[in-house]
Amino acid sequence: MKTNVYALLTPISIFFILLEVAVNYVYRKNLIRFKEFFANFGTALANQTVNVLVALGVYYTYGFLWENYRLIEHIEMNWLGYLLLLLGIDFIFYWVHRWGHHINIMWAAHSPHHSAEEMNFAVALRASVTQRLFSFFFFWPLTLIGFKPEYIYAMTAIHLFIAFLHHTELIGKLFRWIEFIFTTPSHHRVHHGVNYKYLDKNFSEFLIIWDRIFGTFEEEQEKVVYGMYHHPKTWNAIKINFHYYIILWNTAKAAPYFWDKIKLWFMPLTWTPRGLEPKPMPAEITPQNQKVYESIGFHGFKPYLVFQLIFSVWLMLLIITPQNFLPLNMKWYAALVLWHGIINWSGVMEAKKWTILSEMIRLVLLSYLCFEIVNIVPNSLPYLISFGLYFAISLFYVFYFSKGRLEEKAINA
């Protein structure tokens, strides 16, 4: 694969995120909380590494279907071809998205995105490590029509970027004809609402007409309350990704009947295995009673996380860019180091004692990656200097955090 579309779209997404942060700061909108912002961004950086695996799956499985079973021998990829492909992806994704809110195992994959308790561009990045894999289980009919796998993969990235632009509170309602045909930020804010009237509404990503046709449309009226019932209550990317899987696993273990243990994963969220007490719907979360997740972090953690974010974005791009100097085995190693670092972000924001040792171990593991990069890259002096500076600053913060000083109060704004 010569080009990873995600690598091309990442800088554009970062630009919009920084623009929104600037507007939020200048106009004091208070729409972005620091800790949740970094939990969102960290989860996204780690999950981007999975797209490499997704791409391989698409090219092998979709490629086999396209080579052997396509109905149309050749589809001309002009503007009409691209538009038809986008509409096909949008229609399929409507149903995948809808099932993702009703079937247990699919909600386990999708719910990390809804665990964000605010609405901004960084929330758009908060997708689970398994959601991308699940999505591509359903786009294969497009190969039977005759669309090449590489075009499907690229167009899903563009489709995802369109959805990215919906995650903001800075844009109000648009012209009526736009709101009638296309999904807008107003529509998608409803989708993220835990208000009872907003639950399981507005699944569309590009055209809102699918919701209008299939009876799942809801207008934004009352103030939207963001989040999810049974919130993971953490900034940890691993826990955010697998929170609902653990709930399902524990329920399956408690189920008395073997078949119910299997059946549970594919049943609606409201289904209860035989022999267990049905769980009542929690009381409605409202603007008056919502208690967003909060934590006390190590003193001085903010500059540290900003510094680590800059390095992690560079490392993520190094991993997901197909053609660069880093061999595939080292990309997988780098991905593990990246995940390790982002888990440590949560430890810093939650002042976990294990973070100090974990960061020391990460820096040791990272030193091997840096050694390999310096050996591979010609004229590696700039890399050597950069890595030296990075390690010096990281070690300073590790020793500073080891003193155990905490921020005076949980400041998330």
Image (spheres, grey):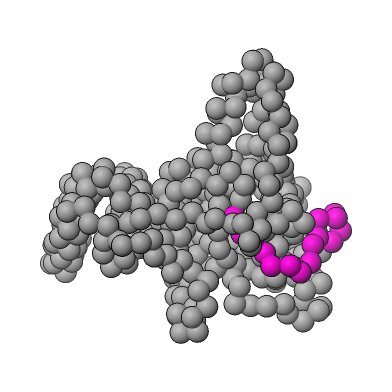
Residue 53 coordinates in the image, percent (x, y): 47, 45
Q: Is residue 342 above or below residue 259?
A: below
Q: Is residue 142 left or right of residue 232?
A: right
The majority secondary structure of the magenta stretch comes to loop
In the rendered image, is residue 165 in sight?
Answer: no
- In this view, the residue farthest toward the top is 257
Task: Please tell me which residue is depicted at 68% across the width and 78% down the height of the picture.
Answer: 172
Task: Please identify the quarter of the rendering in which residue 175 is found.
Answer: bottom right
Residue 94 in the image, given as x and y percentages of width and height:
73, 54
At 50% from the left edge and 74% from the top edge, which residue is drawn?
A: 30
For this rendering, which residue is in front, 131 or 76? 131
Residue 339 x, y percent position in the rendering: 36, 48
- 214 drawn magenta: yes
Of residues 380 and 378, the one nearer the viewer is 380
Relative image position of residue 368 (x, y in whole percent): 18, 48
Q: Which residues are magenta?
A: 212-227
Frontmost residue, 361 versus 155: 361
The residue positioned 63% from the left and 43% from the top of the image is: 107
- The part of the image, by quadrant, that contains residue 382 is bottom left
Query: Which residue is rendered at x = 67% and y = 28% of the image?
Result: 264
* Count of numbered circles in the view: 0
Q: In the drawing, does residue 95 fall left or right of residue 64? A: right
Direction bottom: furthest residue: 26
Residue 277 vs residue 3: left or right?
right
